Image: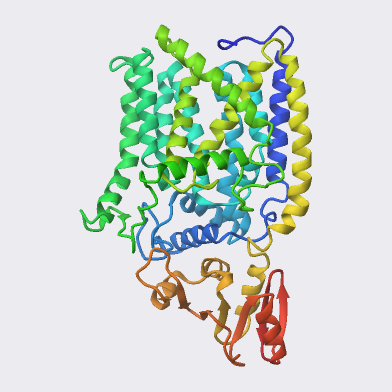
Amino acid sequence: MTGRTRPREGEDWLIRTLFVLFLLVGAALRLWRFGAVPEGLNQDEAFAAYEAWCLLKTGRDSFGHSLPVYLTAWGSGMNALESYLMLPCLALLGRTALAVRLPQLIVSLLSLPAAYGVGKRMVDRWAGLCGLFLLAVCPWHVMLSRWGLESNLAPGFLLFGLYFFLRGLEDCRWLPLSALMYGLSLYCYAAIWPFVPLILLLQTGYGFWCGKLRLRGREGTWLLGAAVLLALALPLVLFLLVNWGLLPELHLGPFTIPKLVVMRDSEFSLAQVPEHAANLLSLVLRQGDGLLWNGTDRFGLFYYGALPLALVGLVWAVRETAEGLSRREPHPAALLLIQLLAGILQGLTLDANVNRVNTLWIPVVLLAALGTRWLCSFDPRALLVPLLIFGALFLRFAGYYFTDYAQQSRAHFGAGLEQAVEAALAREGEIRVARGANYARVLFYSGQDPEEYRETVAYKNYPSAFLDVESFGRFRFLTGLGEPNPACVYLVEDGDWAYDLSAAGFAVDRYGCYAVAYWE
């Protein structure tokens, strides 16, 4: 397996059939009960959704910034692209979980054929099918696809950037599209800002060194790509200068370069590289971080048998890259190794969990695909064995995800809060809310008027990197229940406070994990 090979005579129909089948399998698991499992919203996706709601209604975010390149949100910021992608979804579908999660679903579905395209250009169409299948059934990627954490857009856009760069080495007209994808990835996840330039520098340098990119002629299209990338990166460079105190808050036409309440840039640390390395190694070997929304202990991130295959693929990719360098002949595997290297370096500079180094996992899955293809290179029909094994694991995971996991995740995603907020708003008086409900969820579910929110919001800890809201509009957030007030409506978690309110004579209606108490 030294390069791309043509399928044997009569195999073309099989490859096409499997391509469609694997796409359908991946799409089915991501679409089935989409928006309902997991039930509820994570607080981060809820705040991204409320920011989109504010932008849709007023053209400004929750802090009043006109079309900001980075959202202030919690006080120390939030990546903006997810919220902007939600705008048409909210306009068409309203304030629903379906609308909130649709951008992530679309990016994740498009990642499946992109994985095929990368594998195909690394080796052949069989390798592409391996990449497509392993990503389609990958537990981490399935779970990522079904909720809207804004930073989880980054793996998809980096994959798109890699795919179009590979195509750009064959036909330079694809390079501006690669630059667009890499540039948009910067608006997905601030933690990759130092590493996207590294990826581009190494990939571009590799392309020039191997003669696939040139300064003149038609190959000079890369200059257009560079211009696209610069245009996208410049606002974020200005954002850093503003928040480092070197420039005042800026306005570029309708766009704002905002000054955050607190600039949270201390997460990166070179002083703790040994500790971060040990944590990253543990994360990879355990295939999880114990957080229910990132993965499952039962199945790992990409099933436990995939890691040895990824190691085999890594050996193959390093060997092919080294041989290509010695002959000054480009090999696409080098570009995958560059993305893997960037993900590892990111993991060495911060205290990682699964979503903080989410850019690492698609390269690992693709390496597992290359390892599978290499082991079966004597006859593509041998691929049937690993496909059957991972297919069986996939069926078990699917059964678990829509039963046990759906139940276990309800509390983490605040199931029932939407209905509880609606019930509380239907009654008169101040609404006192247990802090476990989280104010970001209440903002979105209530459809809180953005102008009223900006005028009435009060914080307990301003300024802070993570602002703690005390009240806004009709809502007041409690640290303790205190003496129940019959003039107020209480929105609390279904637990001790709900029982205390019931004992005090309040009527209590229960909605999933929450309860609404009121005086009759």
Q: Where does the N terminus fall, quadrant-wise?
A: top right
268 left or right of 393?
Answer: left
Q: From the viewer's perspective, is 283 left or right of 188?
A: right
The residue positioned 25% from the left and 58% from the top of the image is 249
Q: Is residue 13 left or right of residue 202?
A: right
Residue occupying the point 70% across, 21% down: 16
Residue 412 percent location from the top left of the image: 63, 61
Tally the numbered discs. 0
Q: Is residue 518 in view?
A: yes
> Residue sitting at 63 percent across and 40 percent down?
301
Give the position of the C terminus as an image quadrant: bottom right
Say how the picture is coloured.
rainbow
From the viewer's perspective, is residue 497 above or below residue 358?
below
Q: Is residue 181 visible?
A: no
Image position of 55 with respect to 425: above or below: above
- Relative horizontal placement of residue 262, taking residue 185 as reference (left or right): left
**Quarter-of-image position of residue 4:** top right
Q: Position of residue 475 (x, y in %)?
A: 52, 79
